[in-house]
Amino acid sequence: MDGDLREFVIYRCIVGSRAFGLSEPGSDTDRRGIYLPPAELHWSLEGVPEQLEDEAASECYWELQKFLTLALKANPNVLECLYTPLVELSTPLAEELRAMRSAFLSKLVYQTYGGYVRSQFRKMAQDLRTRGHMRWKHAMHLIRLLLSGRELLRTGALPVDVGEHRERLLAIRRGEMPWEEVEAWRLALHGELDSAYAATALPDQPDYAAANRFLIKARRSMVREE
């Protein structure tokens, strides 16, 4: 990770198993966030990377515009950053972004959550048939994703901690739940996701104008007077 750019991180949070309430001994601590470089770096010929990543430390920071773009597309990993209660660093600008997080929620959630899970379960079923292999941790997180998407469509807010579903999800992770039972739970959740989508009060599209106003304000804040 580029240390010179890391000093411009404006938001850092903990996501993944620790935020979901699904951590076990030895679980990694996954940190994600946002960085906002000075205008002269952003405008330069060299430019700035869309993300800073340190795989060894399980850290990733998106440049603000990239983060907003992903949030507008209802990317689950990015929305999770805005709703996790485990926040380690948040500047006033980042707090303003968190305060407007509902602007990124829309019916697009139905596809980004439900569509992704369907495609991944098809691949896992194929692996199980051809290789006899199953990534149980991945299956657990896919079920968790459906639970989150369902509640997001129902309530207009993203629950991060899995609460009452914890033990059942961990049983999947440990391979203690038969594949047929996992698949049955998935299908039931897809049905509930469909019903939530039909009744949701979320708008068809996120608030692009609000996101754009915020980006312009943030960019202006990083212009240094000569």
Image (spheres, helix red, strand yellow):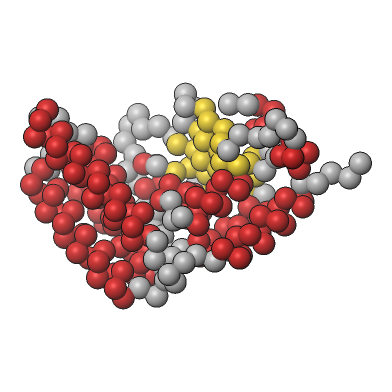
What x and y, as percent, mark residue 195? 24, 70
Image quarter of residue 156: bottom left
Between 191 and 16, the one lying in front of the other is 191
The residue at the far right in this view is 226
200 over 5 or under it: above or below: below
Residue 46 in view in this figure: yes
Query: Where does residue 7 sit, x and y in percent of width and height?
Result: 69, 34
Q: Residue at x 23, y 50 (%)?
A: 118
For residue 89, say whether it is visible. Answer: no
Q: Quadrant of the N terminus?
A: top right
Residue 225 vertical position relative to residue 102 in the rendered view, above or below: above
Q: Residue at x 39, y 66 (%)?
A: 107
* Residue extending furthest toward the front: 45
| x and y, in percent, of residue 214 in the image | 66, 59
Q: Tell me which corner region of the image, top left, top right, bottom left or bottom right, holds residue 226.
A: top right
Residue at image position (70%, 56%) is 216
Q: Nearer the viewer, residue 164 or 8?
A: 8
Q: Residue furthest top?
A: 56
Q: Report the residue at 26% width, 39% height from top.
A: 138
Task: Give the side of residue 176 with respect to residue 68, left or right.
Answer: left
Determine whether, in the image, residue 151 is placed left or right of residue 207: left
Name which quarter of the figure residue 139 lies in.
Answer: top left
Counting from the top left corner in percent of width and height, residue 217 is at: 72, 57
For the image shown, how many numbered marks are present on the structure? 0
